[in-house]
Image: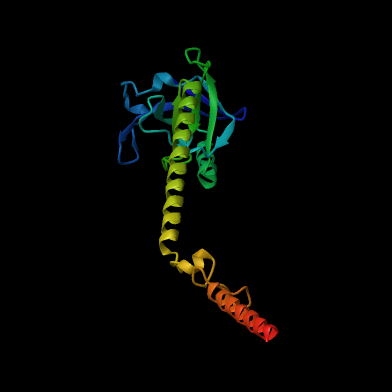
Amino acid sequence: METSLLLEGNFLATLAPIRRTNPTAENFSDPSSGDSDPIEYEDALPYEVDLTGYTRDPLLVRPLNSSTLWKEIYLRSTDKRKKLGGFKKFLVERKKSAFGSFPNEEAECGSGTFVVPHDAQPNNPEVIFVRLTLDQKAAEREAGQEHRRRREAVMTVHKQNQEQQQSQKRDTMPKKDIRATLGTSHPVGSKKAGKRPGLLGNLMAAERRNAHHLSANRKQKS
């Protein structure tokens, strides 16, 4: 099965699935070799895809390994127009991935998503690596849940760091003098100079007043 790849409505390439024969090297089967075994996920390929946008969303560029919604496949250009190499170079230089939708009546929202990531592209200019999901809505829901999980994890780490910094700041603060903490440098119960006399001063003043009064009375009697 072949797929027509468009870029914003303009023809880009006609693509056919190709098998990667060595996972650790860029070895692909030759279409003319007569290999008739089906290639994994080739039945999922749409007849036509129009790439209408670009993204750096990490969950589109590189979905979760645990996701069962996304399929990966290599495709080779069969039209000999040699447009794929320039297109892949454009994506790599800008670190963007191209994506587009295609109709799928079996999907929840009636469409799937086709992504050409900027990374993991083979050096062969006529071979392209793509990811696709047959259910766009389910993939968006999965990505949304993962984005929320990652945000919550970041917020948790940020809160823990703040609490740790505050704890360290408290531990390094110098201990204050207890008198400074009480707001006075005078002993408890004492009065500052220039203020009213204390209890002893009051007693001595009273004794002086009594002595003066007694002396005055004696003079009057005499």
Q: Is residue 11 above or below residue 43?
A: below
Identify the residue shown where x is 41% and y is 24%: 69
Position of residue 169 in the picture relative to residue 83 (left or right): left
Q: Which quadrant holds the N terminus? A: top left
Whole-percent x, y for residue 113 in the image: 50, 25
Quarter of the figure with residue 71: top left
Number of labels in the image equals 0
Identify the residue shown where x is 40% and y is 61%: 171
Closer-to-camera residue (186/214): 214
Whole-percent x, y for residue 165 in the image: 44, 56
Identify the residue shown where x is 55% and y is 28%: 100
Whole-percent x, y for residue 68 in the image: 37, 25
Identify the residue shown where x is 46% and y is 46%: 159
Whole-percent x, y for residue 50 in the image: 57, 26
Q: Is residue 159 above or below residue 18?
A: below
Position of residue 196 in the picture relative to residue 38 (left or right): right
Check the image and name the residue furthest to the front: 222
Closer-to-camera residue (14/142): 142
Position of residue 17 in the picture relative to residue 215 (left or right): left
